[in-house]
Every structure is written in structure tokens, then in C-alpha cells.
Image (cartoon, coloured by chain):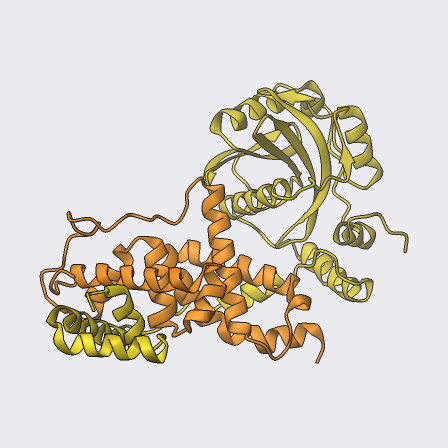
Amino acid sequence: LNRDERFAAEAVPHLRSLFGTAYRMTRSVHDAEDLVQETFLRAFRGFDRFTPGTNIRAWLYTILYRVRTDTLRRAGRSPSTVELTDDGPPVPPSQEALGDSEDLCRALEGLPEVFRVAVILRDVQEFSYEEIAQILEVPIGTVMSRIHRGRALLRVVLGGPRP
Amino acid sequence: LSCNPERVTGYVDGVLDEASAAEVKAHVGTCSECREQAAFEQDLRRRLRGLSALDPALDFEQRVLKRSRRPRRPSLRWSLPAAAALVAVAILGVRTSARLLSWELVKDHIHCFGRTPLEAHVWGPDPGRVASWFGENGNTIPVPPASAGGLELVGGRRCMLLPDAVIVAHLLYEGGQRRTSVFVLPSTRPIPDSYTAEIDSESVRLLRVGTHTVGIVGDTPEDAEAFKRAFTESRAWNETPSRPFLLTMDAALASILGRPVGL
């Protein structure tokens, strides 16, 4: 297999899940498409630096997250880090406790991006803490803290008892 | 052991070491609050895993692959068929909407100015020299303004725009922290006479000046407007007829390789 074929064989199967994550990250089909486009562009250019047989999925997500933070930095923003205060979360709690998956999606979308991304990587994409630490380029303790905060916010939004 | 909700999360995820896991497990057995948290998180994990996948548009995979393979520094062996294919596409004259064109210009603007050192093929500030460099390399353009809105010409480069693989002159202007790109586009691009867009917090102006089509990407609307005025009012740009864009294999290859080639 030449480089092109190897890239197609290894990276393309992850395109759908990358798009799903990009969409949940950006909350826009247009931005998600841009994000995945740029991710694949960088991945293709950097494919020589990828060691065959190692974790390509985590590698692609690392690039995806880097592209996302670069984009936000250029726009003068950073993934929002709204604190959980006694006033409650940034979205109004849903009326139906533990509603269906539509409620779940809406609750997830309402999370500040840093926590949302951590929860998506762990609970939707089922990455290990080590992989998430690599993708987000933060220590494992921070991974645990972000996942915890994300889930705690979801618990409030979904109408469970306040943590 | 007092409540430590973060460790309960680690416990649910099975990432604590044996001793800590045993501690948390014992605590959860006696503390209803932490038990509820653990139960919620376990249930949440189950529900999130079950979320339906979000599918991109049907042609998305093709589009992504097509763009990903747009090479920056490929081998000559790879470039030849690629360039030939791109030239063939160019001849077919794929039409692009103004919005898509603007989007591409913004990407190129961000890409070029995001690189350190700045990637120019010819350096300013002499507009005459920059124009003649473009002429020698296949993109004949009139002498551009040396400055506008406080930004000065720092250089130029040739870049390829998809989908029709046309090679355009890209003029780079800087002033303080602000940057503006001016692209001289082939007049065959179907755009309205005057077009304005804001994309990724950049301001885009597409306009016709004389026989030229100019694309401006500025960091602020004021910069974009200043350049729009400078080009609209330029005698050289209004009076010098543009030479038809020659998209040759040489030019396509030179653009891909970032240097002129002799075949």
C-alpha cells in the first residue's frame, strides 16, 4: 500500500465518529464540516509522523482538538470555562426528570465546551483517561475533574438532585 | 472518609488504584449522596453510549479526501498526475459560489499569516517589483497599491484555489497586528459585481475593478473597505487590461512545489 492508500484505509473509517464529535463540539454542521476538513488536511500532511500500528483514533482526535482550539484562539475565544456556582448551570433545567435522548442531547449541548468535550470523549466515544489526557494535552487529574464537572452539570440540568 | 465527588467519578470509571477504589467503595456504601452520584453517573454513561451517531452529508467523505490530498510539499512523482488532474478540472471550469470562494480566501489568508516565518515568494515593499515578479511567474497583474488603511505591502505569493485549481496572485499587507490579503482572481470566476461577507471573524470583499476580479480579506471591516477603495480608485487597475490567466502545467507545478519549474 502506498501512503495515500494507507491513509484512506486507516483514517477514513473514523470520519463519521469525528464528524459526530465535531458537531457536538461546535453545535453547527458547517463548523463541524470545516473542523473535520482541516483535521484531515493536517492528518494527511502529518501522516508520515504517525507510527503505523499505534492508536490512530486518538491521534486523529488530538488533531481535531488542536484545530478546534486554534480556531477559537484565532477568533479570540477559548473553550468556555463557566464555573458551576450555586446559581445553577448556564441552561435552564429540563422539566422532565431523566427525559429521553433529545433532552440528553440538549443538556449536553448546554454544557460549557471544556466539560462537554471531556464528557463526549469519555462517555460517547469511550476513550480511556490516558487517551483523553493525550487528546486534550492536560494531566489525567484534570481529565477526571472535567469529566466530573461535566457529569455534575448534566445531573443538575437533567433534573436529578443537586450534587 | 469524607465525600470526594471527583473520586466517585474516577471510581465509576474504574480508573482509581486498588486501595483508593476500595476506600471509595466503602464510602459509597455508607453515604447516600455519593451513592446517588455514582448511580446517576453509571446511568448517564449508559445513556450517552446509546446516543445515535450523527452522520455527515453523503458526499462529505469524498469532499474531505479531495481537500486533504491537496499537497503542500509532495514529491514530483506525485505532483505530475495530480497537477494534470487539477488542470483538467480547471479546463472544465467548475463554478464556485461567491460564498465558497470567500470561505476559501479566508482559509488561505489565515493559513498564510498563521505561519512563521511568513511564507511569501516575493518580498515587499516595492509594489513595482512585486508586480513584475508575478508577471515573470505567469500571473500578470497591474502594480498594486503600496499601502491602504495604514497597512503596507510586505510581499506576495502564488496560491492555488480549488476547485478549479486556478493559480492566483496573493498580495500580503501588514500593519501592526493587522493583516490583509488581496487575491487577484481570474475574471472567469462567477461572482456578483460587489460582494461582502464576514467569515471566521474576517471581512471579505469581492469586487470587479476594470477587467480584474479582486478578493480582499481583512481582519476588520474598516481594513477591507480601505483596500476596496484603494483598488477601486487605482488608475493602473482600472486601465490596465488583464491578460488571460494561463494555467499551464508549469504554472500548476510551480504552485504546488512553491518554486518555478522547467519541464
Q: Position of residue A66 (x, y in %)?
A: 51, 56
Please indicate whether residue B65 sits to the left or right of residue A117 in the image. Answer: right
Q: Position of residue B240 (x, y in %)?
A: 74, 26
Task: Name which quarter of the figure residue B175 lies in.
Answer: top right
Of B106 and B12, the residue lying toward us: B12
User: Which residue is pictured at 42% across the width and 61% down the height?
Assistant: A22
| Chain drawn in orange | A
Of B171 and A26, the residue lying toward us: A26
User: Which residue is pictured at 64% across the width and 37% down the height?
Assistant: B183
Query: Would residue A160 be seen by someone viewing this image from the given angle?
Result: yes
Please indicate whether residue A155 sits to the left or right of residue B128 in the image. Answer: left
User: Which residue is pictured at 72% across the width and 63% down the height?
Assistant: B85
Q: Position of residue A104 (x, y in %)?
A: 22, 66
B125 above or below A89? above
Query: Would residue B57 be seen by someone viewing this image from the given angle?
Result: no
A129 above or below B19? above
Please indicate whether residue B5 sits to the left or right of residue B90 in the image. Answer: left
| Chain drawn in yellow | B
- State the quadrant of the C terminus of chain A: bottom left
- State the quadrant of the N terminus of chain A: bottom right
Of B137 and B219, the residue lying toward us: B219
A98 above or below A38? below
Q: Position of residue A15 (x, y in %)?
A: 49, 70
User: Which residue is pictured at 19% across the width and 74% down the height?
Assistant: B27
Of A12 and B195, the residue lying toward us: A12
